Image (spheres, rainbow, N blue to C red):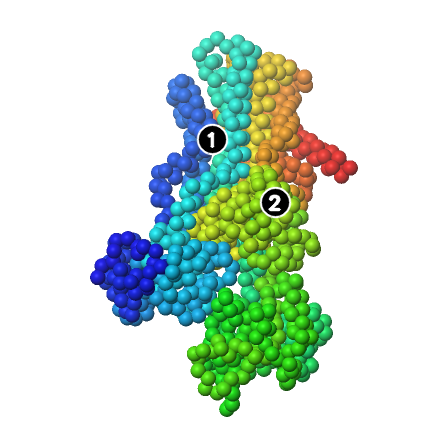
Amino acid sequence: MRPSAAPPADPSVRDADDVASELGVDPAAGLSDAEAARRLAAEGPNELRSRPPVPFWRKALDQLRDPLVALLLVAVSISVAVWWIEGADGVPVDAVVIAAIVLLNAVLGLVQERKAEDAVAALRSMTEATSTVLRDGRRFTVRSAELVRGDVLVLAEGDAVGADARLLSATALRVQESSLTGESEAVLKDATALAAPAPLGDRFDMVYKGTAVAQGVGRAVVVATGMGTQMGTIAQLLDATEEEVTPLQREISHVSKVLGLTVIGIAVVVMVLAVLVNDVSSAADLVTVLLLGVSLAVAAVPEGLPAILSVVLAVGVQAMARRNAVVKKLHSAETLGSASVIASDKTGTLTKNEMTIQKVVTASGEVTLTGVGYRPDGEVRTGPDGAGGELTDEELVREVTMVLGGGSLANDAQLVERDGEWTVQGDPTEAAFLVAAHKLSGTVDRVAAFERRGEVPFTSERKLMSALVDPPGDGAWALVTKGAPDVLLTRCTDVQVGERTVPLDDERRAAALAAVERLSRQAYRTLGVAYRRVAEGTGAQGLEEHESDLVYLGVVGIIDPPRPEVTAAVAEAHGAGIRVMMITGDHPITATRIATDLGIVEPGARAVTGTHLDGLDAAGLRETTRTVSVYARVAPQNKLQIVDALQADGHVVAMTGDGVNDAPALKTADIGVAMGITGTEVTKESAKMILGDDNFATIVAAVRQGRIIFDNIKKFLRYLLSSNMGEVATVLLGVVLAGVIGLEGAAGSETVVVPLLATQILWINLVTDSGPALAMGVDPETDDVMARPPRGMHERIIDARMWTGVLSIGLVMGLATLLTIDIFLPGGTVEGTDSLTVARTAGFTTLVLAQLFNVLNSRSETTSAFHRMFVNRWLWGAIGLGVALQVAVVQVPFLQVAFGTASLDLAHWGVAVAMASSVLWFDELRKLVWRSRHRA
């Protein structure tokens, strides 16, 4: 039988057998392998549709659309035109060099984008889901991507639901649907058809792709796969959400515009001045002037910037990946460093997602259990805070043993140890009893001696779960019940006190309820445990009738423990001026308690619920997000509201999420952070960063790395711009002051006299731009990046203070270079005896060495160059290489011919080094003055 072309009409209100018949499948045998393969080929894989891959040529073209790259291509065109006008003699060195850098930048961008894509793909493959299905009457485990409509799913505790399906049968089946609906409690499922259509969260006879089985077993027939699932519907909605441009992208675009205007202005001014100052009367002279303008344009544009930017971002991305933070786009790496708000989920990110029993209260007292998580290490100590010492009171030992033993018997979870790692299968709350039982000697052995005979599953209406157990030896059986303490106490008539049972009078009942209330105020989730004896051989049917006249044993306090490293991470974030917010679906009391314990808020802070947010207008919402940092019982639209309000206030928002319902908020946030372990595929696709360990501390570590990236970008920008301004100042002032420094008198046969030749300017760019700037881009922290607040949303990467430093350093470089030329030339302010070639070579060398000194200056805007001076071996390697190349271009004969240099003696070298070092001493003095004023 072939299925209909379309999915069954609302299968939740139809009989399960009718749905299976329409899909052409026998529920008892499932599809045949051949039929499943045919349907897979016809319908396609059970995957969410992703955007079509961008072709290689398009990716390569995108690398060339950067504004800075466009400026470089213009410079290449001008350089080739000048070379052609001059007769196309030799090789157009400047054009070749710039074109090579453009190509290098494109290759680096492509390679690093591919690396990021590979990292995400590797993470996805590590978490690929599988499903158990019936085919040809046998069970098989297949990739969830291979599921087809009509497949019969075999569901058990811990399974991920691979597709939307209509239940055929369900036994105590509870499904965790928080990733789809936001509901934190597992939903009890029932195969009975609904009487009328219901909202998604109330379709108890359906299971959905992306959810997980928390308890029980069941079978279901697949009714929708891929984009036809509820998850697929949400994925389609994401296309309407606009993505934000990162702060770094906005800033680099601004820098590009400023540089473009600067380049044009400087080139025009210099060419006009050169024509006015010199007697330009021939085409050759005009070409010389034009070449001078182009050379200055090349000098003014830091042509290594795009390549260096890609390398710095790539190195930062790799450093983050080593800390389990996979950044999908290079430009997103810096954005996290700009974050002023981290809005985090609670469960699994701030906490361990390992429910832990910390308190047990019985008739004879209270005990505290140490240890957290699923590792069964710890001990039982007396008193509310465990200060009473080791548990020795026999009555209390008996009562606590019965509470933990009873909770372990009325239980469907399993505690599993593999290679030293402890994990659970089933409901985490039930698993908490199994872990706690290991901490009290003899409890596990006592539980193991019982044999289970039947159960009454938990329902949200009853709020109870019972198990019928057969104790060792002959005698009566027992019905053990656990559930909501207030409900359980209404069914109890007695209470356990040591070995005895005594009537549960009003005083004892009030004391029990008071203990429950006290634990609830402390943000514990409470579960009560009780039991009664029943006749041996009692049948499993009708057990619910026996859930009365129970003996109350006590109550446990359960909490999802915070990750131990998160408190320090939150403190570090606060120290860095970053506000940490908790957004959770849990109860406000629980959320506030965890947030207080972690240091997110001060004691007494309030939590705001999603219902409260729904009642606020835009102004009220913005005011609330300014003052409240804990949000509980939130819906997906509330997360979007919070993100929008924070961004409207000028914040850069990092938002974490794991469920499908988080995806729109993650895409809207400046940095959407998806969970690599518990996150759904839709969430990972929407996010800009994926946490491999689902740990909040990893986010803060990534923030630090993001700030280091931003600092290093500022370092090499400061270096490149100030050094290039030094070249501009040298040529511009050299043309204007040619008569003052003796250039005019030493001109000889040269009609247009300039302090530096065009080839020398290009050489300076080759030697001093890329190498030192690249090394600076991987510089370790010079200043503590987490000791200052995040930069403002509209704060320029090159602000007024940096521009002042860039221009002042450039001016000092230019003056030092021209003064060196003046020292060696006859006829200037200082009388010299050398030729124009020697004097120009000395000035040329001074400018190169000054830029290498400037490398040390640029590592910090305020800290001395001598602080942590030798931590970056790459930087010193670049400086050493620059010095060696300059010695070669001055002393090697064939390079002298190519670059118009002459050999220098030790005296010339000494003067050049001394004049070049003025850049270092000037900046040290400037920094000292700034630090003195800052301290004052």
Q: Nearer the viewer, residue 227 or 74?
A: 227
Work out which residue is located at the far left of the displayed protein and give it: 1
- Label drawn at residue 625: 2
Picture coordinates of residue 533, whole percent (x, y): 54, 84
What residue appears at the point 45 percent right and 86 percent down from the top-left corner?
A: 537
Judging from the image, what secondary structure is the residue with disc 2 in?
A: helix
Q: Residue furthest right?
A: 936
Disc 1: which residue:
67
- Residue 5 against residue 387 in the figure, above or below: above
Instruction: Say which residue appears at 57% left-offset and 79% top-offset.
Output: 550
Is residue 668 something that shows in the picture? yes
Q: x and y percent of residue 880 in the render?
A: 57, 39
Q: CA–CA distance between discs 2 and 1? A: 37 Å
**Camera-side residue of 294 and 318:** 318
Residue type at tag 1: Pro
Residue positioned 53% across, 9% down in the render = 279
Which of the pair 676/900 is nearer the observer?
A: 676
In the displayed orientation, state which residue is furthest to the bottom: 474
- Whichever of labels 2 and 1 marks the residue nearer the N terminus, that label is 1
**Left or right: 106, with 724 as reference point:** left
Image: 896 above or below 565: above
Label 1 sits on a secondary structure element that is helix
Q: x, y (%) of residue 207?
A: 40, 61
